Image: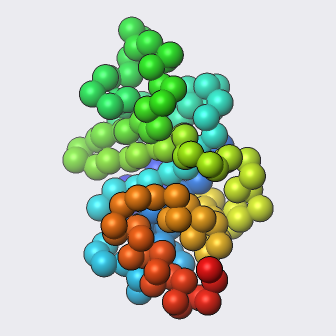
Amino acid sequence: MEYLRIAEILTNNAECRLIGSLSLMFQHPEILERKPSDADFYASDEIENILNIIGILKDNGYEVYSWQDRIDEKFDFGKLKGRFYIRGICDGKNIDITYEIEGLNYFEMKVHETDIQGIKMYDTEGIMILLSKSDKEKNKRQLARLAKKTGFQ
């Protein structure tokens, strides 16, 4: 699966960790409403790291965007602040890299890192922290089901 291949590359070559439905699929597939349709990552917001991620995505055939703006040699990287994520697109597959989450610091989340099948992601508590930062109804439902299953609050 392409998403697993790119997840292994990104998480082992950048300050970037798998999150979202694909991460839940590895650890708690029973709380998902449907199979993952993309791959989501949380990354350090340091510009060198973001540039590295962009390079990795481009080297693997992805076009990379910040909102509607294609990231190419003319892109103004000053636009990244406040946009929260970049997206890689290749053959109908989406890779979303979130680098800003209000109230959360990438490096503080390191205590929740785990490695599953060579892909770096967060443990259950880390997943719950990330889900709690989302205002999406799907993520709120996932958090409630995960809390009920694990007893974590």
Relative placement, left or right, of 69 versus 76 is left
Q: Quadrant of residue 62?
A: top left
State the colouring used for the structure image: rainbow
Work out which residue is located at the far left of the displayed protein and give it. 92
> Vertical placement of 90 versus 52: above or below?
below
Q: Residue at x 42, y 76 (%)?
A: 142
Residue 128 horizontal/vertical position (percent): 57, 70
Relative placement, left or right, of 74 versus 42 is left
> Vertical placement of 146 versus 87: above or below?
below
Image quarter where the N terminus lies is bottom left
Image quarter where the C terminus lies is bottom right
Q: Residue at x 41, y 82 (%)?
A: 31
Observer able to see residue 5: no
Residue 144 horizontal/vertical position (percent): 46, 80
Q: Give the camera-side residue of 111 and 11.
A: 111
Q: Residue at x 63, y 59 (%)?
A: 120
Q: Quadrant of residue 66?
A: top left
Q: Count the marks: how many? A: 0
Observer able to see residue 132: yes
Q: Quadrant of residue 45?
A: top right
> Vertical placement of 81 versus 53: above or below?
above
Q: Give the camera-side residue of 93 and 135.
A: 135
Residue 7 horizontal/vertical position (percent): 50, 54
Q: Residue at x 47, y 37 (%)?
A: 84
Residue 60 horizontal/vertical position (percent): 42, 38
Q: Give the camera-side residue of 53 and 41.
A: 41
